[in-house]
Image (cartoon, helix red, strand yellow):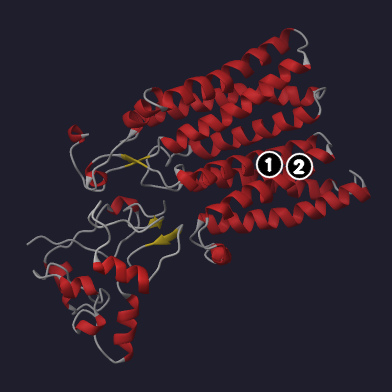
Amino acid sequence: MHIEPWEWMVKPTPQTEWIKNSGMFIWLAFFFVEIGAGMYFVSIYFDNLWGMFIGWLLLPILGGGLLLLHIGNKMHAWRMMINFKKSWISRGFILIGINTILGAIHLGIYKWGGADSAYGMGIVMNVFQILVILYGGFVISSIKSIPSWNSQIIPVLFMVLGLWGGTELALALNMSNALAETWIRILVPTYVLLLGIYIVTVYQYTSTGKHVFRAITGGKLALVFYLGAVGLGIVLPLIVVISGAFGSVSHAVIAVAIAGGMTGDLSMRYCIFKSGFYTPLLPVSKSLY
Amino acid sequence: MACPYKQRTRYEERKEYFPGQGYTPYEQMAELFFPLKKKTAVKCNFCVEQIDSGLEKGLIPGVDREATPTCVNACPTKARVFGDLDESESNVARLVRERKGEQLRPDFGTDPSIYYISY
């Protein structure tokens, strides 16, 4: 959409820094960091070493790697660590760094010492995975100039998305994992409920709510929202979850549901990022919107 | 993203001041002497190098031109005033106090050091 140079001062304008061009790396980084942490978290419960290992790799390599790709001067990336008292980016950088190191230690103990030896460290790693997933949501919710992001529901919503995505990946590793199916039966309805609450609160209680709603449900974003976030990301997994409650579901159907869920997760994050509208800088009458 | 006033931008490429008319001589010089690295954050720094240089010479920012941001010096109507807000008798502090200077969007919680006063 064409925006006049001055319009950002008097009209809500969509953010582009974290979704357009190289901003796509930020969108994808959030996704991989959170599902990586989610996968590590659930794999500890499932006693799945491969799941923990893949989750551990996803975080720094895909998540961290994509964030580094976004940075123009990569040799200055270390500067992100030094302002943790004020900067969420700095806190995340340190958190993911510590998580990676501790994860390596945990995996080593698990591999060569056994699950019992790694139990205590596993509890520590579970706490870290929750912190890592929540961190992504807190970064976004700390941006006060984008009202639809400045919501306490965002960290919880992203946490459920991260755990759900991680559980799906863990289920993809072992399709006979009944515990993973149980987790998904809880996480999918929870996600739907939280998403509904988020959309309603954004529409009703934020100054840019109507713009967000129009952006998501109309225009170019509508296809991503209805097909990706709702169709593949909610309806398909819900159908499989409900079917699973009445009988067994084939592995092929589960695989399709997992792919749909992942696509839905990415699509919903894309919609949230794409529909982040800045409030106008100057206090103008809303009738001018 | 962190700046709610959109004053921090990500430099992708130098945009023509007059779109479609090529770079002005000033832009050409800027590219030659101060090339910016792509995908890095860019913002106004109040000509901090100039201010630091002036302070070293014992000059007073906002009073002496050599220790004042260029935009303040350049403004033909003196609409911009620069100085030490913490110095209660400085020009800028008196103006903010007497003319009831206001910050833009105090609800963002950023406590910006830029005040707007009406004449």
Q: Is residue A59 above or below residue B117?
A: above
- Viewer-side residue, A241 vs A224: A224
Looking at the image, the residue that sits furthest to the right is A113
Please say if the residues under marks 1 and 2 sit with CB atoms less than 8 Å apart.
yes
Q: Is residue A20 left or right of residue B66?
A: right
Spot occupied by residue B50 in the image (x, y as percentages of width and height): 30, 80
Where does the image place residue A107, in percent across and percent down from the top left? 83, 49
Decide if residue A208 is on the left or right side of residue A199.
left
Quarter placement of the C terminus of chain A: top left
Q: Amino acid at mark 1?
A: Gly
Q: Chain of mark 2?
A: A
Tag 1 residue: A36
Q: In the orientation shown, which residue stands out farthest toward the top?
A: A246
Answer few, some or many: residues within 10 Å of disc 1's Cα (few below 14, many 20 plus, some between 14 and 19).
many
Is residue A215 visible to us here?
Answer: yes
From the image, tell me which residue sits under label 2. A54
